[in-house]
């Protein structure tokens, strides 16, 4: 999760965009890696997938 | 060719990559976008390492609230141009190099001229719209872009080689919402140092770069992680560029 915590969710198959919405995370503010690889939020995730939700930082 | 003073100045680096490697750094022309927190770390270490020509661009003046992290600038510089302050600091660190400081906004109208003659782009900006401009300019010129960004204890970095790796827009298709970000100087230190290390390795042609890898620094948990990325066939910025066998 963006705050560094881990969370297990019981899923069948769901679009990442929907998972983010359920978690109340604005998709514009994050990128999502599925099993270590950045994917579009339109991608499906299944119960065995590990998602890493990374908050995009923009400062310099 | 290095003179005697340069051989002495860079003696510890010459032990690392030889006079030949040092001469490669000397021949490099670097564009540093921003003289803020990241730009401070990036420019100081690039100047000290002996990158021969540095062009640093920033349109702002130094504010007191910058000084917790923008180590290019000192208390006496408050109110002065960041570009000018940066130039003085960098030449104080290393008078053997050329430093060009430009007080200007990087935008569609200025970017072509600002990048003329530069071999590498160091992203030390504080916003994504300008980063996308740098990304497109790097793609058009086929020169590398060394991305870094920070917020509070967190940071990210990657190295973009046009035609070979994911570009910035492949990784971040949309800009995150603009907001005033919290900033810790040491986070700039971590990410800026990674960017400079990447640039040194790129110029020397040594080591493994952060290609198609987004490095993530979580200072709060003292954790370095990375996620893989790849070119997107639907990317508006880089999809027209053919794959290359090598950089």
Image (cartoon, coloured by chain):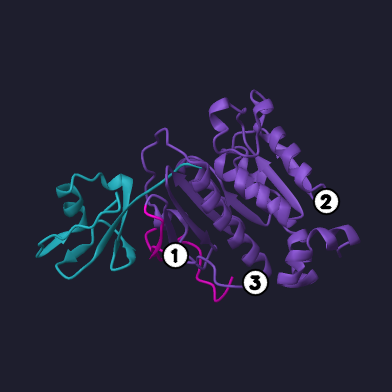
Chain under label 2? B
Query: Label 3's element?
Result: loop
From the image, tell me which residue sits under label 2: B96
**Above/below status of B23 relative to B56:** below
The part of the chain drawn in magenta is: B221-247
Q: Is residue B43 left or right of residue B12?
A: left
Q: Earlier in the sequence, mark 1 or mark 2?
A: 2
From the image, tell me which residue sits under label 1: B213
Q: Residues within 10 Å of mark 3 (few under 14, many from 20)?
A: few
**C-alpha span from label 2 to label 3:** 23 Å
Instruction: Tell me, for residue B205, which label it has, or none.
Output: 3
Chain under label 3? B
Residue B110, x across and y down, in percent: 63, 38
- Mark 2 or 3, closer to the camera: 2
Query: Label 1's element?
Result: strand
Name chain B's colour.
Answer: purple
- Quadrant location of the N terminus of chain B? bottom right
């Amino acid at each position: 999760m963006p705050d560094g915590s881990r969370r297990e969710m019981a899923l069948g198959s769901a679009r990442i965009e929907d998972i983010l919405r359920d978690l109340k995370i604005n998709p514009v503010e994050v990128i999502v890696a599925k099993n270590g690889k950045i994917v579009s939020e339109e991608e499906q995730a299944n119960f065995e997938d590990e998602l890493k939700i990374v908050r995009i930082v923009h400062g310099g | 060719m290095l003179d005697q003073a340069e051989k002495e100045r860079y003696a510890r680096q010459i032990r690392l990559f030889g006079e030949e490697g040092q001469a490669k750094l000397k021949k490099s022309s670097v564009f540093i976008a921003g003289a803020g927190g990241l730009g401070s770390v990036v420019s100081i270490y690039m100047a000290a390492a002996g990158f021969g020509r540095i062009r640093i661009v920033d349109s702002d003046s130094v504010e007191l609230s910058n000084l917790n992290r923008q180590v290019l600038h000192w208390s006496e510089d408050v109110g002065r141009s960041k570009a000018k302050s940066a130039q003085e600091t960098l030449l104080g660190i290393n008078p053997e190099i050329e430093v060009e400081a430009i007080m200007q906004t990087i935008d569609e109208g200025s970017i072509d001229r600002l990048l003329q003659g530069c071999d590498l782009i160091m992203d030390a900006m504080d916003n994504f719209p300008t980063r996308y401009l740098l990304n497109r300019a790097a793609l058009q010129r086929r020169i590398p872009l060394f991305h870094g960004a920070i917020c509070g204890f967190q940071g990210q970095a990657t190295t973009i080689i046009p035609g070979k790796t994911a570009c910035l827009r492949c990784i971040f298709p949309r800009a995150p919402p603009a907001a005033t970000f919290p900033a810790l100087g040491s986070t700039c230190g971590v990410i800026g140092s990674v960017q400079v290390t990447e640039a040194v390795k790129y110029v020397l042609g040594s080591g493994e770069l952060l290609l198609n890898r987004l490095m993530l620094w979580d200072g709060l948990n003292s954790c370095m992680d990375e996620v893989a990325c790849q070119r997107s066939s639907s990317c508006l910025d880089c999809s027209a560029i053919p794959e290359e066998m090598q950089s």
